[in-house]
Amino acid sequence: MDAMRQRSLHQTAVEQFQRAADLVGIEDRYRAILSHPKNEVIVNFPVQMDDGTWRIFRGYRIQHNNVLGPYKGGLRFHPDVNLDEVKALAAWMTFKCALVGLPLGGAKGGVTIDPSEHSEAEMQRIVRRFTHALGTNIGPEHDIPAPDVGTNSQMMDWLMDTFANLSGPASRHLVKGVVTGKSVLCGGSVGREEATGQGVLYTLRHWCGETGQRLDQLSVAVQGFGNVGGHFSRLANEAGCRVVVVSDHTGTVSSEKGLDIDALWDWAQDHGGIAGFADSAYGIGAEDVLTDELFTTPVDVFVPAALENQITAARAHVLQCRLVLEAANGPTTPEGETILESRGIEVVPDVLANAGGVIVSYFEWLQNKSSRAWSAEDVDSRLRSILWQASDSIVATRAELGCTRREAAYAVALRRLQAVYDRRDIFP
Ligand code: NAD
């Protein structure tokens, strides 16, 4: 096991931005501010279970920085959610929003819970109680959550409804933008559901343009088949990529000729995971393989789309790909990254690759503010244009500084943050 896997994820996030801060000469006072979240909200809230018993759950909302705009970031429901993880995820949101030029800050939240252990009725009570416990720590002009691992549009609808009902009658409809990633019926944006996966694909297209590759000739391995990994796989498959191996928490399936991604997607929706697909009538040509094969199968692009710390030093040694496209947040350990670099494997960093989610969340927030609904074409073309500009700025900054893509991404973000701090200064 990586020795460094034991260290704090937040420390990793701080070290990542400090490296870029050295390159572009960020002032010490800004480094100090960005090394800590502004606010750490921890709530313990009671919820009644279906059998009549009560349980206490622990929830977090970490507000990292809001110099560019209201705090923004997802809510994760997972058994491993803890303060250190949420602090790291909140910091990455600040740099992501700054990199892609959104007028938003960074935050993240979550509840330490295994969603698979709860009925839909329990889950609704948990989301409503969590929202109530967060109270005025969130708000449409203050801090705007969204979905992340283990949460979905139904939960965002419950959150919005709870917040709206806690607001005065006159403002009930003004607060829809308290959360993004809602269903389209309840004020969500078309294109938000698949936005993160779509964004991952746009950054892959940009990389193809940069390096002279053809998208429809690439083979791909994907870890995680939820919102991000699932939609990315579907869209990449549609674009002509060959998705040859996919894993989730239930198993790993592979097909040298390319998996039938649409059939796998339907299977995973119906069965809660990909296990059983290869043995079913739908899994023609697919076979179950050991998890290790996800990392050792030769592919052009490896796409981590599950959780953090997946590409450890040991796995970085055995990966057989040209590009790691970080759809998940923080999937590569610092040691893993050093080994990828020494092996000449490129990395498109998380703060760019998965920014499509927060970009379309921003569009949803704008639509809620103006009570208008944009077309799918509008959403898609604006998403593409923002990611294209951000990718171009990374290429230019990389050439200027002679650094990695990740360092260049942080350099772009830090320059924006420093420029705003310079003008506003630090109050009081
Ligand atoms: P999700 O809950 O929809 O899916 C997570 C997937 O990871 C599931 O398929 C699960 O089975 C799989 N998984 C969990 N543990 C695994 C393991 N050990 N090995 C293989 N697979 C495993 O979550 P999501 O929304 O798709 O988020 C995935 C990643 O993308 C996270 O890092 C998240 O922070 C990031 N992200 C999500 C969004 C978004 O809009 N949802 C936006 C930006 C970044």
Image (tube, rainbow, N blue to C red):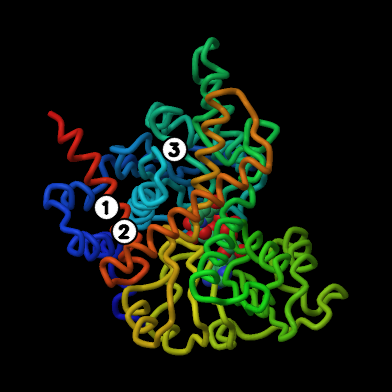
Q: CA gap, disc 1 to disc 3?
A: 37 Å
Which quadrant would the N terminus be assigned to in this image?
bottom left
User: Relative to 406, does residue 166 appear above or below in the rendering?
Assistant: above
Ligand 1 within 8 Å of the CB at mark 2: no
Is residue 293 shown left or right of residue 19? right
Which image quadrant: the C terminus?
Answer: top left
| The quarter of the displayed image where residue 221 is located | bottom right
Residue sitting at x 45%, y 48%: 110
Numbered disc 1: secondary structure: helix
User: Which numbered disc flags the more N-terminal residue, 3 or 2?
Assistant: 3
Residue behind mark 3: 45
Marks 3 & 2, CB-CB < 8 Å contact:
no
Q: Is residue 44 above or below residue 390?
A: above
Q: Give, as a three-letter code, the residue at label 1.
A: Leu
Q: Secondary structure at mark 2?
A: helix
Q: Residues within 10 Å of mark 1 (few under 14, many from 20)?
A: many
Q: Are marks 2 and 1 in contact (CB under 8 Å)?
A: yes
On the image, the x and y values in percent for residue 369 come to 53, 25
Q: Residues within 10 Å of mark 2 (few under 14, many from 20)?
A: many
Q: Residue furthest top?
A: 170
128 to 18, vertically: above or below: above
Q: Quadrant of ligand 1?
A: bottom right
Question: In the rendered image, is residue 113 in sight?
Answer: no
Q: Residue at x 63, y 31 (%)?
A: 187
Q: Residue 329: give x, y in percent of width and height.
A: 44, 61
- The residue singled out by tag 2 in the image is 410
Residue highlighted by disc 1: 414
Q: CA distance from mark 2 to mark 1?
A: 6 Å
